Amino acid sequence: MFETLSAASADAILGLIAEHRNDPRPEKIDLGVGVYRTAEGATPVLDVVKAAERELVANQDSKAYIGTAGAADFNSAMQALVFGTTSPDKRLVTLQTPGGSGSLRVAAGLILRSSPDTTVWVSEPTWANHVPLLGGAGLNLKPYPYYDTSSHVIRIDAMLETLRSAVAGDIVLLHACCHNPSGLDPSAEQWRAITEVIVERELVPFIDMAYQGFAEDIDADAYAIRHMAERVPEMIVASSCSKNFGLYRDRVGTLSILSADSKTRDVVDSQVNNVVRTIYSVPPDHGAAVVSLILHNDALRSAWVGELTDMRERLRDMRVLLNDSLLAKVPQHDFSHLVRATGMFCFLGVSVEQVARLKKDFGVYMVDSSRINVAGITPANVAYLADSIAATVAGG
Ligand code: LMR
């Protein structure tokens, strides 16, 4: 039967990992997949994660199933982290999921059960896997304008105008912070304007938060979620611990669903748990148990906030360093959007041909759209990187 298949094309982001690994040039630079790296180019396990893992190994007394929703202590801690709540909200259900992607997939399953024909509006551009993941699950997707690739600003008026054309019940996928790929987030004022349209048109916000803590801090990065949660009857939030806890391969995330009232919440709770059972049955435990230990222990929690702050500040420093280096080498090109963006990503702002040339001639790897992961920049490689970019943009 498999002879009917033809090979799938390499993933636009994950495919770069192997390409970069197989490049023999020692000066090569990986600005591809969104993984944090130190100035030495490493992605170490956070110290606080190591400490929590030691405690877990010493004290965990069972590996028995924990159920479709995962661990209650993890879910309550994550609900508080995401929503800033101090006590459980009777309209809200939060489930442990295998990373942010698992959360998105379960959310798609729930949407398909409740409103299979609804439209999900996604930002243009958005994370390269949003459309394959949600569209592949069977949702109808339509783009809303988000980023102006020539002036490097958010197209807020065009975005609001498009959302005003949506019909009641449509879903709007938003990035809570560190928009992937552009790195540009709405200001608080723009979030309020987006919320007004959502309320006015009776739309349902579906917020993906993969980078909480990477833009400004844990609370500021959740502004859109917390602002909307007070104003809308229904909302979906996917959250990931891959980046902020460095638990990429352990697959840790949550799915939260806000319902109009507590009775509906209980129905949603039963349905979403049933969706989980039909996809992966129960979520993986290890990473979530580590996060739960950290969030429930004051000392571990403050150590985590410290490590998260270090990561965020290094990313910000590398943006400034690259922009300064490019300004010195190619002052006629404006790269100042690099420092206006936050988190791991932004567009370099070069053509797909120039992206190919950077890879071929200089061993500099980035996504075709010219999205770069600034964690790949270090004080040691920035001069070579800026020279490579300068030579490429000078060549047209
Ligand atoms: C990225 O955008 O590079 C990350 O979110 C990793 C991924 O899975 O694509």
Image (cartoon, grey):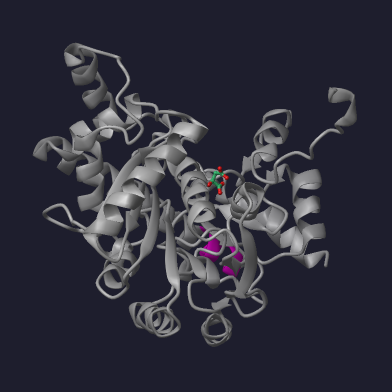
Tally of numbered tags: 0
> Residue 53: image x %, image y %?
26, 22
> In the rendered image, which quarter is residue 252 located in?
top left
Horizontal side, residue 343 vs residue 289: left or right: right
| Quadrant of the rendering where the C terminus is positioned | bottom right
At 49% from the left edge and 62% from the top edge, which residue is drawn? Answer: 179
> Residue 383: image x %, image y %?
59, 52
> Residue 268: image x %, image y %?
35, 51
Front-most of 301 and 129?
129
At 16% from the left edge and 43% from the top edge, which residue is drawn? Answer: 302
Front-most of 110 and 36?
110
Q: Which residues are magenta?
A: 322-327
Front-most of 392 and 108?
108
* Residue 207 seen from this side: yes
Q: Residue furthest right?
A: 3
Magenta-drawn stretch contains 324: yes
> In the rendered image, which quarter is residue 82 located in?
bottom left
Q: Quadrant of ligand 1?
A: top right
Q: Is residue 244 above or below residue 259?
A: above
> Residue 377: image x %, image y %?
53, 48
Magenta-drawn stretch contains 23: no
At 42% from the left edge and 61% from the top edge, which residue is drawn? Answer: 207
Q: Is residue 204 above or below residue 285?
A: below
| Quadrant of the rendering where the N terminus is positioned | top right
- Main SS, magenta residues: helix
At 47% from the left edge and 71% from the top edge, which residue is drawn? Answer: 340
